[in-house]
Image: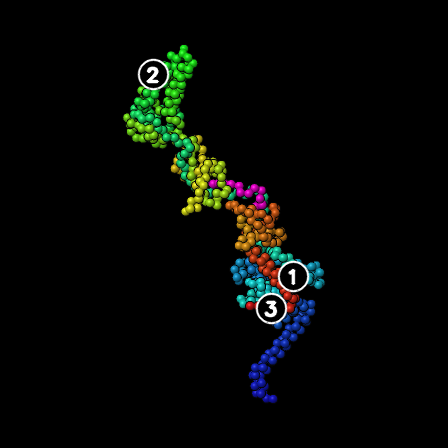
Amino acid sequence: MSLQGDRQDLSRPGRFRRAAVSLGWVALGALLTWGLLANPLGLSKLDTLRHRLLGDHPVQDTGAGAEGTTQLWTCGMHPQIIEKEPGQCPICGMDLVPLRQEASSPAASAGGTPKATREILFYRNPMDPTITSPVPAKDDMGMDYVPVYAEEVAAGPTVTIDPAVVQNMNVVTEGVKRGDLSREIRTVGYLEYDQQKMVTVTTKYPGWIEKVYVNYVGEPVAKGDALFEIYSPELLQTEQDLLSAIEFARRMENGTEEARDRAQKLVEASRQRLDYWDVTPEQIRRLEETGKVFRTLTVVAPAGGVVMKRMPGLEGMASRPGMELFHIADLSSLWLSVEAFEDQIAWLRVGSEAQVSLSYFPGETFVGRVRYIEPQVNEKTRTVPLKLEVPNPRGRLRAGMYATVEFDPVMVRDAVLVPRLAVLRTGQRNLVIVALGGGRFAPRQVELGPEGERQIAIRSGLNPGERVVTSAQFLIDSESNLQEAVQKLLASREGAGSTEAQPAQQH
């Protein structure tokens, strides 16, 4: 055959491909021959070269590490990413961390039989565990399927994480404790006068005020201090009736017993009438001792405190019964008006203590007690008004001041407590991640009790002394859910037949 005919035959596509394959096998044979001659014992190197040339499933290169294995690198957030060199994760950009590998046995290190490999049941999609394959595969994004090992399925949803990955994930744990659960209730209010310690000064008889001893609002007075003098014809007549009854009883001392009793009853009736008109016992006694009527009667303060109201122009004013002349408030204690939400009232009751702080006295707190809880909820604000009694012995607190109130009632005593950050709420169940030690974590369903500001009471599912994860538990729970889904998928496969009989589920 001529050279021109040979060129025409090689130009055909089928013959060209056969020629290229033949040349490739010749080159592979030459390389293998050279490798055997150069390094007859380096079979692992040649095996790796064969896999790379033929495109088979890659294997780890041996002999590069201190223990005979090449160090691999993975991402703490995406364990399906495995690289041979340090770098950054192509998904989240985090720095890759060393991948923990099983230590080789002494026989393997000495060149003997290597340690038995882990049994791979199947491969799952890294994004959707329900999509599996019996052989290595890639998803639509080009990500490698993750192998599912037999020991992982047997261990249940427990997750084992490398200590370096745990540190990078900032996993924080806290112990489960037993104690009293308190709930902090914080609200604001304002001070006002104690309504039980306010008195109004008035007269029960008509008259004219001739002299006033208290002349301005805010003046302190003590119980029994003189407020004003009043002239009243009716009061003057009653005083005269008392003196006349006393004189008649003195004349009846030598009379019959019936006459003496009648005279004494007249004296008692006159005294009682003066007492009903708020004449003090001291004034009545002085009237009887002197035997002279008083033209004006001095009206005294019925209680001590501060004058909060005074009718202007009292001196010379005609007074009628029931006219409010003075208001006196006792400031030894004040009332603090606050409001609490309806879901907080269940933990408050009459007598509950509260810490009261005011911006006027920085760094200082006062103690108040609940005196009254209104029986009705405000329909607009959904709050309930309360009244607290706050002692004011030195008189520094004043009505109208704003205050911050903090309650700390005990909701549950001797309860199992965990931080609120440790609870994962799914809507249908509540989970916590329990740290088992040695980098192992397991999700556990719990029954919640009352919730405080920072802690939650656990009714069942945990015991004191265990440790729960309070940070990064969402990442651990997601990995645990993947393993749980793999277990359910494996159980369903065992019910329908063997795993090898099932076709690969790929989307």
Which label lies toward us, 1 or 3?
A: 3
Q: Which of 304 and 288 is in front in this view?
A: 288
Badge 3 element? loop
**Mark number, residue 504:** 3
In the depicted structure, whether residue 253 falls above or below residue 181:
above
- Magenta segment's dominant SS is strand
Answer with left or right where residue 386 lies relative to residue 148: left
Q: Which residue lies furthest to the bottom in this view?
A: 1
Q: Nearer the viewer, residue 213 or 471?
A: 213
Residue 99's spot in the image, x, y percent?
60, 59
In the depicted structure, whether residue 230 falls above or below residue 35:
above
**Where does the C terminus fall, quadrant-wise?**
bottom right
- Report the residue marked by disc 2: 292
Q: Nearer the viewer, residue 184 or 158?
A: 184
- Report the residue marked by disc 1: 150
Q: Which residue lies furthest to the left in this view?
A: 316
Q: Can residue 430 be seen in this view?
A: yes
Give the spatial CA distance, label 3 vs label 2: 121 Å
